[in-house]
């Protein structure tokens, strides 16, 4: 246990101020999203902008571009949440996926993972191209569902974070493993909180 705590401390202390700020904003942003606060969007946009800078300097260009997708989805979500309700001044209610929506979301995630994985395998030196591709693909679809305020977005984030924890742990990146375990717990809490809210108000189908 002491070794794990030491690794966490070393990982955080060794991070740049931008990395530290992005980490804090990431945690705050997820908490705000659970609370269905509109502040989740500007906080999230600031977080992905800082993350893009970090990835650029680390020469993780694919991850840097992924932040651009997140930024666009967050900007869209900010607009959609405030304009999608039954009244112009009402926040959009939580919705649920139809069976067709489930098929589309899962199908898009899997297809995107295979296509992106094939590209990474043949045109980059990625160590685990398909693993990275599927995590990225499911993350993009989950972010889109979150922007649409669909309950099942949390299923995607639970899956993504659960997959990331052992990857970082085995790779010796203890700090990131612990961070994504925290995100996993927050995603589970987010699903329960949104489901409770939806049950009290009734559900529409997306």
Image (cartoon, grey):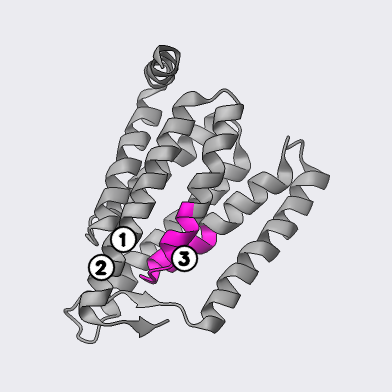
Residue 203 quadrant: bottom left
Residue of label 1: 192
- 170 vs 85, nearest the viewer: 170
Q: Quadrant of the N terminus?
A: top left
Q: Is residue 165 left or right of residue 116?
A: left
Q: Position of residue 127 (x, y in %)?
A: 73, 35
At x 56%, y 71%, the residue is 105
Q: Position of residue 150 (x, y in %)?
A: 39, 71
Pick out the residue farthest to the front: 1
The answer to if 152 sits in the magenta stretch is yes
Mark 1 or mark 3, earlier in chain: 3
Identify whether 88 is placed above or below 123: below
**Numbered badge on residue 144:** 3
Q: Nearer the viewer, mark 3 or mark 2?
A: 2
Compute the Cα span from label 1 to label 2.
6 Å
Rate crowding at label 2 as few (under 14), some (14 to 19) or many (20 or more) other CA atoms within 10 Å.
few
Q: Quadrant of the C terminus?
A: bottom left
Compute the Cα span from label 1 to label 3.
19 Å
The answer to if 22 sits in the magenta stretch is no
At x 53%, y 29%, the residue is 57
Compute the Cα span from label 3 to label 2.
21 Å
Identify whether 157 is placed above or below 25: below
Residue of label 2: 196
């Amino acid at each position: 246990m002491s070794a794990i705590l030491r690794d966490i401390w070393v990982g955080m202390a060794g991070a740049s101020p931008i990395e530290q700020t992005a980490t804090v904003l990431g945690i705050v942003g997820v908490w705000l999203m659970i609370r269905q606060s509109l502040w989740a969007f500007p906080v999230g946009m600031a977080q992905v902008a800082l993350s893009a800078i970090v990835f650029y300097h680390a020469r993780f260009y694919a991850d840097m571009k992924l932040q651009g997708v997140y930024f666009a989805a967050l900007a869209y979500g900010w607009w959609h949440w405030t304009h999608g309700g039954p009244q112009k001044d009402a926040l959009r209610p939580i919705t649920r996926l139809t069976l067709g929506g489930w098929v589309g979301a899962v199908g898009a995630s899997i297809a995107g993972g295979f296509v992106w994985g094939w590209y990474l395998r043949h045109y980059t030196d990625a160590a685990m191209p398909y693993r990275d591709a599927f995590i990225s693909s499911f993350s993009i679809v989950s972010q889109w569902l979150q922007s649409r305020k669909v309950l099942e977005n949390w299923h995607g984030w639970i899956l993504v974070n659960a997959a990331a924890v052992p990857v970082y742990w085995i790779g010796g990146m203890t700090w990131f493993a612990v961070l994504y375990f925290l995100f996993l717990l927050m995603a589970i809490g987010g699903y329960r909180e949104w489901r409770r809210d939806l049950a009290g108000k009734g559900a529409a189908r997306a």
